[in-house]
Image (spheres, grey):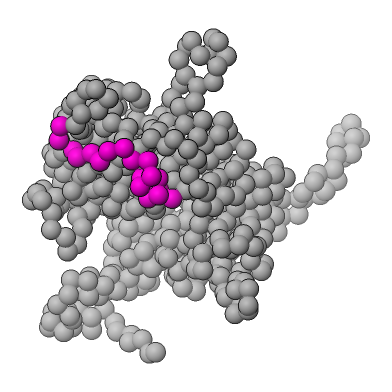
Amino acid sequence: MRTEECNVCTLLIKRSSGLFSNGAGTINRKNLKILRKLLCQDTTTFKWVWTKQSKCPIAYERGRIYFDNYRSCFSCTTSVPGLLYEIPKCNRMEKIEDALLCECPVGETLPRHSDYGASLIALTANNWLVRLSANTGEVLEKVYLSSDCKFRYVTWEAAQETVVVKSAHIKGPARSTQTGSQHSLLLYLAVFKVLPLSVVGMLEINKKIFGNTVTDATVSHGVLIIMHSTGLVRLYSFQWIIHQFMEKELNLRQECIWNFGNGIVGGYPFGIPCNIRITESPPVLFEVSSLESALQIGGYPWHYIMTPNKKTEKGIYHICALKDNKVATNGIQDMQCCSLESDWIYFHPDESGRIVHVGPTQINVLKLTDLQNESGDCLVTEDFIIQARREPKVNPLVTVTTSGRVVKTRFSQLDDDPEFETFKNVDYEDELDLLATVKVTQAEMEGVACLTFYNNQNGSLIKTLPLLESWDVTYSHGLFFDRDTIVHIEQKPNRIFCCYVYKMICGTPEEEKESKRSGRRSSLYCAKRSLDLK
């Protein structure tokens, strides 16, 4: 099938002439196609436009940067990030501890007008689940969870549809500790539908039901996932559990009679009763023993990635068929990295069924191919490889000290040697279908980072951009590539967090030549470093 290649001018003329379909999705796809073409031009670069520091962790999601425990929000949709809203200061018990950005669903009729805008689903320190307007910070809904435990985390069970609120691990009473008896209750999980906000149920994870080795649990994509200290991971049908063990359906803001008492569901202090009580072990859908209980499921046909439950197997990944636990042909992936930090692997977020394996010196993008045999086996092959620029460094394997002692080294060079390019971050821009990687090289006691864009389909290099700020590999970093914006969030010493924002700019070939000739980039770097020193 031939794909039509149009330049940006042709696409703009067609759009202004109304030659595109009237569908919003079609127009949006054409706009993103224009943006991608502009970004891939040689004269397009990214310019540092904004920096802000904070004493609290910084979060970024879909064009919004959150500071001060989500109290202030800055929008990145303009040329320079600007304050969108700021919530009045509150005491530490009312601060937001975790949050998710919820977008308005398309094509659905919602009960309230406020439901049609983006909102922030936030969890406060005093166990309130709050829905805030993502544009004004106004409180739209509040639900009190419980007084029995401390809730700490909120995650998606199904993206933009269902959320799971998880409590911290529940400590046993002092009396049971003194007598040596074991406390069986581990944690609580509360599940909610969003837009409109409604409660699915609250359930407890009990060691008497799932075993004494249970260490953690969550709900994802209709599956209850139980993790054990032995490395065992077990999956159960959450819908089956609801059908079998739900004692009573709950409706928010409605009166409920519970355990010889009554109250308003979601109101203080009644909260959300534990209406799903698992009294016996549910049937296991799937189980596997993996190192550190690490398990990923994805691909097509369905496969999972795990590491055999032995410390000696760390860094070796097995890609197995979900239907029969059989390792795929060429399904054992081992980069044999000689590095301080281990490699990592995951299913590609572009829903192509591919697998991304990232090491310090290279990125392997793998694909699953059906062998078309009777057993339905799959073959793991390399789709493409992205490699860091390396020069061989010759170090003697045997050295002699001044005292005459012979010292033998086990290896000549680390794969993550700071003097050479090392992959530190990989991000995927789904709307532009581009891979963005961060490569760091140590120079003059500072980490120099560059951002490199690759074609997601074939791994071809598109362009490389230097980051003005240094990259300290001893601290955590987060990099987000979102359309025409790059956001870099880093942690500095003394728990200082810093956010850098870059914006895409398009120049002419003459401006690009003049910029290279005058060394404007180096002067910008020097100016930026002087600002950091101040």
How many numbered circles are shown?
Answer: 0
Residue 403 position (above or below residue 17): above
| Closer to the camera in the image, 399 or 84 | 84
Please give the name of the residue rendered at 47% of the width and 31% of the height, measured from the top-left corner: 206
In the image, taking residue 60 as reference, residue 196 lies left or right, namely left
Corner quadrant of residue 534: top left
Please give the name of the residue rendered at 35% of the width and 47% of the height, measured from the top-left corner: 243
| Residue 451 visible in the displayed image | no
Residue 432 falls inside the magenta stretch:
no
| Residue 148 visible in the displayed image | yes
Residue 117 position (above or below residue 506): above
Please give the name of the residue rendered at 30% of the width and 49% of the height, measured from the top-left corner: 162
| Closer to the camera in the image, 452 or 529 | 452
Corner quadrant of residue 1: bottom left
| Closer to the camera in the image, 106 or 173 | 173
Please give the name of the residue rendered at 57% of the width and 49% of the height, measured from the top-left corner: 287
Q: Residue furthest bottom?
A: 2
Rendering coords of residue 392 (x, y %): 70, 59
Rendering coords of residue 169 (x, y %): 44, 28
Q: Give the range drawn in magenta.
A: 237-255
Rendering coords of residue 300 (x, y %): 50, 68
Rendering coords of residue 386 (x, y %): 55, 65
Q: Which residue lies furthest to the right in this view?
A: 404
Residue 280 position (above or below residue 425): above
Residue 84 position (above or below residue 54): below
Q: Which residue lies furthest to the left in this view?
A: 113
Residue 238 falls inside the magenta stretch:
yes
